[in-house]
Amino acid sequence: EKGGYEHFMIKEIYEQPKAIRETMTGRLAKDDSRVVFDELKWTKEDVANIKKIVITACGTAFHAGIVGKYYLEQLARIPVEVDIASEFRYRSPLTDEQTLAIVISQSGETSDTLAALKEAKRLGARTLAITNVVGSSIAREADQVIYTWAGPEIAVASTKAYTTQLISVLMLALYLADLKGTLPPERIQELIKGLRALPGQAHELLEDVEPVKTFAQQYGFNEDVFFIGRSLDYAVALEGSLKLKEISYIHAEAYAAGELKHGTLALIIEGVPVIALATQHDVYEKMLSNIKEVKARDAVVIGIAMKGDEEIKKYVDHTIFIPATDKYLAPILAVIPLQLLAYYAAVTRGADVDKPRNLAKSVTVE
Ligand code: M6R
């Protein structure tokens, strides 16, 4: 059932090109002009009534929500709050009929997320679930559902669920942008073309995993690892750090790169691995300054950058390149080397990859 792979996690990492293709199937207009969501069928008026979006989720799905905030705010120009599900319901959220509450959950059974969904409904919000499991409790409770169609995810560490959640929220943002007229048609088309290229690019990335494997073996016995990035790269850093902690038990921290000098820089000493994501062009120069800050403390820096970026090599010790893509699509590719890093670090340390200690695949207790 693992299809020749040693663990479910690595099988699921390799299933990503197929999974992300399935997520998009039937949802992109043939001429690339817009996203089609037959399951939503919203009108311009429906969308004009959405004054605010709140996204609630847990763990990896929460990290997908953080990326979703960038997508929905920047492309559809709707204010978005992202909240951890177990926090949302106890903070008297300012949610009403003009709020769209989005919950994200792979399993559709996470108690905290289900409770947040019920709370949002009680407050009168319109609700939308992004989930992978058809007929799950969350799918049944929400007013509307977008299925991610990633196929069953067995490993406790979520991988293909995350990338398909990102695709789903991005498509939702483009769908809303079209109805609201917040993006020029050429920009929508450009992003849809970029989406279509992703399965092939993810496949390309998965063909050469040797460098990542070597870094995992080389640094897999360090006790602390830092992940830094700005903007969307910061959101991906959070997910990379969770993945590493969860299965390899290495202490990891994700930091918005500009925040390092407000405290964390004190922990960066000689030899500490720092994974620096630098895929976002609008903050690229700032990111290079942050890389210099950690290099000055003798950290070992592994840069994650887009193919064609020769500049980065001057500043880091090693580089992992992802295929060149749009800044909004970069997280979907950039997370893949981080998933692999976590996987090979866990294997190097002899950890139980698919069933990490103390964790369950689906958390049905609060
Ligand atoms: O099934 P869900 O997406 O609701 O699960 C949420 C989290 O429990 C889950 O993402 C968890 O953080 C993963 N083990 C992360 O890899």
Image: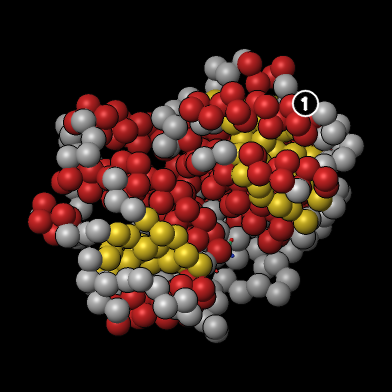
User: Residue at the spot x=47%, y=65% of the render?
Assistant: 83
Give how far across and how far down residue 175 sits, in percent: 23, 47
Q: Please, which residue is most extreme toward the front here?
A: 262
| Front in this rendered view, residue 248 or 206 | 248
User: Residue at the spot x=66%, y=72% of the render?
Assistant: 359
User: Label 1 is placed on what type of residue?
Assistant: Asp
User: Residue at the spot x=71%, y=30% of the render?
Assistant: 291
Q: How is the image coloured?
A: secondary structure
Horizontally, is 152 left or right of 236 in the view?
A: left
Q: State the residue position of label 1.
A: 317
User: Residue at the spot x=43%, y=66% of the render?
Assistant: 56
Ligand 1 is in which quadrant of the figure?
Answer: bottom right
Horizontally, is 79 left or right of 189 in the view?
A: right
Give how far across and how far down residue 96 sits, in percent: 27, 72
Q: Quadrant of the N terminus?
A: bottom right
Give how far across and how far down residue 308 sits, in percent: 55, 17
